[in-house]
Amino acid sequence: MPNEALLPVAAPSDDPPRARALREYLVDRIVALGVRDARVLRVMREIPRHHFAPEYDLGEAYGDYPLSIGYEATISQPSLVGIMSEALELSGHERVLEIGTGSGYQTALLCHLASHVDSVELVPELAQRAASTLSALGCTNVDIHTSDGWAGWPQGAPYDRVVVTAAPEVLPPALLDQLADRGRLVVPVGSQDRDQRLERWRKAGDALYKQDLGAVRFVPMVHPPPTTTS
Ligand code: SAH
């Protein structure tokens, strides 16, 4: 069943008029940057992004730039979240795999744009915090997994869509393997030193098509995860 709309209705005390006004302003900017997908824009107008960056004031939470959320992670730049969500071409029926849950903001969008989301995060504290924010906002169609996203999430494959929000130096093969026929994968690839490029892959039977969506900058995908010695 398409997940048409089921936006969480945040209590007014959690979503003051100033936050709504800042969101409108931000989304107008994202429209001006070329994002046209009406469903993406609608959920961006509705989802209280400040819940995902509680340590920042409202002005910062709605600025069009990334914010540090600890553990070397950032909540991604909102215009880029809009661009990537549009690039996924979601109709509402898809099963989605996300790598790099971070704050859970992109995950919240996916909850409302797709039918089910598996989201993989390496840092247990971030995974836990995102899961509780998402649950408080009524996102029931998401499972957060603490794991190394380099391997994807084979238990749930195949996925209609895969989106990655930490940059691997090369494309992890498992992510293409876990993509369903006619699926799409959106991923930033490259190192911090060299230019990262946002890539969109489409699978059609045995054929794979890659499209370059431009230069981006994401935190690196950690792989292999650091080992702890004790
Ligand atoms: N979409 C998130 C972006 C978070 S930053 C947001 O807007 O909040 C990227 C995230 O990827 C970080 O939380 C980081 O811990 C995570 N990450 C890095 N390497 C990873 C890996 N190998 N597997 C899973 N998550 C990883």
Image (cartoon, rainbow, N blue to C red):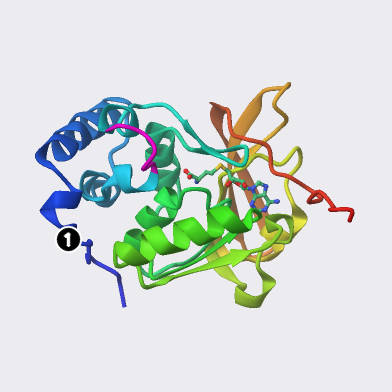
Specify start and end residues of the magenta stretch as a single range: 53-57
Q: Quadrant of the N terminus?
A: bottom left
Residue 59 quadrant: top left
Q: Which structural element holds mark 1? A: loop
Task: Residue 223: say if magenta.
Answer: no
Q: Residue 41 location in percent, x, y?
A: 25, 44
Reading the image, the residue beneath label 1 is 9
Q: Is mark 1 within 8 Å of ligand 1?
A: no
Q: Residue at x 28, y 39 (%)?
A: 36
Indicate whether 145 appears above or below 67.
Answer: below
Quadrant occupied by the C terminus: bottom right
Q: Judge whether residue 98 can be spotted in this image.
A: no
Q: Nearer the viewer, residue 129 or 117?
A: 129
Q: Is residue 54 magenta?
A: yes
The answer to whether residue 227 is left or right of residue 95 is right
Comparing 224 with 38, the one in front is: 224
